[in-house]
Amino acid sequence: MKSDFSRLKRKIIFSIILISVLAFIVAISFKVLLIDGVLQEPFAEYFVRFCQNVLGLSFDSARALYFTLFQQNKAVLEMIGFSIILLICFYFGLSRFTRYFNEISSGLDCLVAETEGEITLSPEMDFMTQKLNKIKDTLAKRQRDAREAEQRKNDLVVYLAHDIKTPLTSVIGYLNLLEEAPDLPQEQRAKYVTITLGKAYRLEQLIDEFFEITRFNLQAIVLNKGVINLPFMLRQMADEFYPMLSSQEKQVVVNVPEGLTLWGDADKLARVFNNILKNAVAYSLENSVIDISAQRRDEGIVITITNQGNPIPQHMLSTIFEKFYRLDSS
């Protein structure tokens, strides 16, 4: 940070020295040329003549007035002159410094207006130029990410709307078939009922996903934090997936030390773990084990959920945790 300001510091020091030297030269010139020069001869003669001709004073009275005004007050005149010179010099010097603030203000205006191109300031303000451009790039990236997330969400809504229509059409079709053919054999009727029930479950799952996506249109969620017994919560979550696990001959192993607690919102964390476990089960191999472990590290807790499944492509690893992202867009 110190090196960032070094160029500006040198510029300021150089400007101060230049202003001081200039003020000194002007002050000396003021003393030599005006106080010791112009205000002596021939100014003294002109002043005496002016007092005699205009004011009607005698020669002695005019000289006495000159002596009183200029000779006795010479130090005061010099002080006033020096002060005026210093004020003028520092005024022009400060106007150069205020230029930096104007440049920064213009740079901030560019950030607010979201103009194209990089922000440029004076060379000695290069450190500020880099910071402003970095902020601009960060804001632009956030906007791009927000637009991409919104687009992914809209795409998912379209996909889900199409997917919801498919099982709904099947449910309606099978129910109409059952209604129109009441004399169907019992075995055939049971088969249609089973298919219809499966389609209804699929429809329920898609509707849940639809509501999960629309939740992100809501405002900030309020967290109700408290002490959470982490081993108990994770074992309870694993037990809730037993029907899904047993049908695929999978199992969940929870390796969490007893007494491990954390401070957070139990309901919100339960939803997080539920979503992760649901994906871990859905995308793991049959007859495989899903491992859940947790350990305290520094001032936090690291929770790891590991499954055995098909590897995720390398180019997708950086985006799988973004909102509404799926490996299979279809």
Image (cartoon, rainbow, N blue to C red):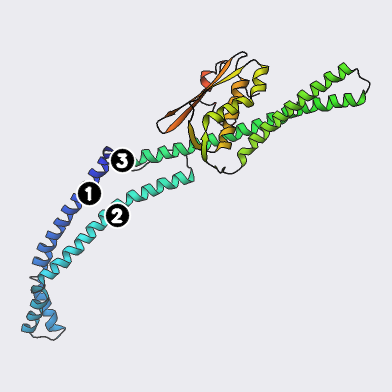
* Label 2: element kind: helix
Q: Quadrant of the N terminus?
A: top left
Residue at the extreme right: 183
Residue, x 52% and y 40% (percent of image)?
226
**Three-letter amino acid code at disc 3?**
Pro
Q: Which mark is residue 95?
A: 2
234 sits left or right of 23 in the view = right
User: Mark 3 = which residue?
Assistant: 123
Residue, x 79% and y 21% (percent of image)?
195
Q: Is residue 299 visible?
A: yes
Percent x, y for residue 193?
83, 22
Q: Nearer the viewer, residue 219 or 55?
A: 219
Few, some or many residues within 10 Å of mark 1 (<14, 14–19, 20+): some
Residue, x 33% and y 39% (percent of image)?
127
11 sits left or right of 154 in the view = left
**Which image quarter: residue 219?**
top right
- As displayed, is residue 256 above or below residue 310? below
- In space, the residues marked 3 and 2 are separated at their CA atoms by 18 Å
Residue at the extreme top: 287
**Three-letter amino acid code at disc 2?**
Ser
User: Mark 1 = which residue?
Assistant: 15
Few, some or many residues within 10 Å of mark 3 (<14, 14–19, 20+): few
Q: Earlier in the sequence, mark 3 or mark 1?
A: 1
Percent x, y for residue 200?
76, 27
- As displayed, is residue 274 above or below residue 122? above
Residue at the extreme left: 60
Residue, x 22% and y 57% (percent of image)?
89
Q: Nearer the viewer, residue 75 or 50?
A: 75
- In space, the residues marked 3 and 1 are separated at their CA atoms by 15 Å
